[in-house]
Amino acid sequence: MGKLVGMEVALAAAEAAALCRFEVAAVYPITPQSHVAEHLSDIVNDGRVDASFITVEGEHSALSAVIGASATGARVITATSSQGLLYMGEVMPIASGMRLPIVMIVANRAVSSPINIWNDHSDIMPMRDTGWITIFAENGQDAVDMVIQAYKIAENRDVMLPVIVTMDGFQLTHVVEPINIPDQEEVDRFLPPYNPYATLHPDRPISMGTLGMPEIFPEAQKAKDVALVNSIRVIKEVWDEWERLFGRKYEAVETYRTDDADVALLTMGSMGETAEVAVDELRRQDVKAGLVKIKLWRPFPFEDLKKALKGIRVLAVTDRAVSFGGPGGPVFSEVRSALYDEDVRPKIANFIIGLGGRDVQVGDFVTMVKRAAEGKLAEPYEFYGVRG
Amino acid sequence: MTTATLSPTIVQNFDLFAPKLVDREEYFSWGHRACQGCAEALAIRLMCKALGRDTIITNATGCMEVISSLYPTTAWKLPWIHVAFPNAAAVASGVEAGLAALHRKGKIPDKRVKSVAIGGDGGTMDIGFQSLSGAMERGHDILYVCLDNEAYMNTGIQRSSGTPFLGATTTSPAGKKISGNQVWKKNVMEIMVAHNIPYAATASPSYPIDFMNKVKKARAIKGPAYIHCLVPCPTGWRIPSEKSIQYGRLAYETGVFPIYEVEDGKYRFTLPVPEKRRPVEDYLKGQGRFRHVTPDQVKLIQERVDVEWEALLIKMERSKSYTEIREQLKK
Ligand SMILES: Cc1ncc(C[n+]2csc(CCOP(=O)(O)OP(=O)(O)O)c2C)c(N)n1
Ligand SMILES: [Mg+2]
């Protein structure tokens, strides 16, 4: 049944990890993730879970320590933001290459420079190709549910990959929302104890993280890609099970009022809720607008996206990060490439918005949709509302 | 300094007979790809014998990981993990924390399994220094063994902070204007001592029983321990491969690399102390990496070694264990 509480989302995400009975946490503080680190520490030091919290001296070590712990067969959690995530960068593809079911909470924040603690997606985007399953939370309930689901997905024998649950810093992590926190028994029923495939233990010595020569390296890379691509099946199964048990539905691509829509917005993360209000406003103004929200970033849900965009004539893709000198924002290039082989495909506009915490309001989304629908775009992408 | 020069009382020392007691099991298998005469590989072999099977090794990137883990082969009969270059200590702390959690919950058999990290001088003293300091400061029950061959050998003999003064490497070459490494070797052993860990020691595979005894002692300690092991590298030092053991001895006999331990704050020599140290020249000569060193520079090195040796002697004589000091304060 769970319990409806009003709770700060960062704390709720940590509570979700506690419900999963994590055994080792290694987290280094960074705004806006710090409340996760602090709350995990509270949980451990109050004895609410039987776990160790390693107060590492940096994020590189945070991820390294949870790799070590995960390799012994422990269930682990880490969390970070921005510079911290980039600092983990070296270890990110190692975690996925070693096929360890680590779960990481990322509180999205802009990366320097200039230094800026506020929200955008410029930290998570460079991690796109590191082989982690990456799921975007839109609200507090997503954050809690997705953290619990993440362990079930990661630890599935057909997956065995690390998972990032990413949530917008401040805009999501620091707001107090009504959230249904599942009961411990419910979570225990949903998530059995981690049953590792292979662990570091003297009773069965194995070597992990060995050297791969050109004769085997590409096969290892392909195996990781195949695992990631195929994980979408498990992710959907887990979401189906979640819906059966908890009554809340999750989809790789969610739609809002797209059935008869002519023009649609596309968002990832917490701005989806603002965009919904904008769609309602546009509908009041007789604009046949809809909204498409990508929740699963890796593996990229190609088929779900194509299905969601059926009948859409114009699509306004919003990006919260820049691919400097590239074809447009990272979401835009992904979406456009996904549709390339379609006979009928929408015209796509790209608005780069909300960098470093710049506010994006309902009216802004309304304007973006109208401009895209009229075909008035600065090609190929536009820094919406940015001076200079 | 050989056993022949030792006092007769030392013959009663059990340690001298210990070779017979050394584990015959090879936990670090033959057939790995190390160079001939690699003292780093030898040190690992000895270390593993002293550690025994209930051990998990975390290996920093470097020669040892490369020569021992070429997929699908492995030289490791102990559970072993390699993650990256800078983070062996962090990974080993995670291994320890993971084991502890699983042990508490009864998910793994009830026995003590030691988490041991190994890294080269680069992986320990330079890029891995932060994670080493963090792991030691946090008090994990881990042993860290630095296998110091005084350069980044794996990538082609580049200078590290472990490279000795004037040592020629590929990034501190003996050039016409600047000749060799221009700064003195970083003393990581003392930095570890300053972390107030229960046990820190220097060692050498040229003194195998001493080294193994230290590994055993460090393994038994509940808490962080550090062993700094000097491992001559024939390829990097430009010495004949059959001389690596000899150069390890010369490093001690000249005082270039003192072998000692610091337990609970108390300094102690663990090998018979040479009555008269050999001149550093005995150690420098024959090593291609010091070929360019001038007689004046040899004097400079000698002077530095003399000063450091004296400074160490003072610590040997004056230092007291924290337990002793505590007792004293009570009185
Ligand atoms: C982050 C990073 N930087 C650089 C390297 C390249 N690298 C691999 S091993 C190594 C040197 C290893 O030297 P050391 O730790 O002394 O070990 P040795 O090979 O001498 O035993 C370097 C520079 C790397 N693997 N990772
Ligand atoms: Mg080295």
Image (cartoon, coloured by chain):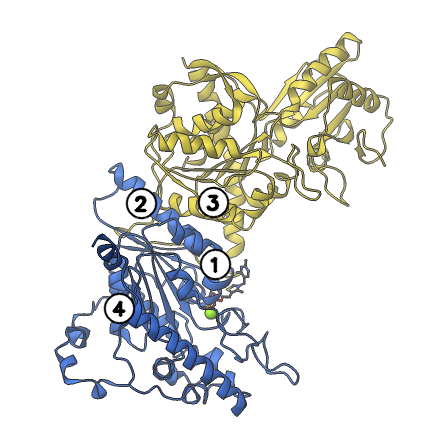
Badge 3, how many Cα within 10 Å: few under 14, some, many 20+?
many
Amino acid type assigned to the residue bearing label 2 in the image:
Leu
Mark nearer the viewer, 1 or 2: 1
Q: Which chain does tag 3 point to?
A: A
Which structural element holds mark 4? helix
Q: Are marks 3 and 2 on the same chain?
A: no
Which structural element holds mark 1? helix
Which structural element holds mark 2? helix
Label placed on residue B129: 1
Q: Which chain does tag 4 point to?
A: B
Q: Contact, CB < 8 Å: mark 4 with mark 2?
A: no
Q: Are marks 1 and 2 on the same chain?
A: yes
Q: Are marks 4 and 2 on the same chain?
A: yes
Which structural element holds mark 3? helix
Q: Which residue is mark 4?
A: B212
Give the image quarter of residue A259.
Answer: top right
Upstream in the sequence, badge 4 or badge 1? 1
Residue B204 in view (yes/no)? no
Mark nearer the viewer, 3 or 2: 3
Label placed on residue B99: 2
Query: Disc 1 to disc 2, how far (Cα)?
Result: 24 Å
Tell me the colour chain A is drawn in.
yellow
Query: Disc 4 to disc 2, how far (Cα)?
Result: 24 Å
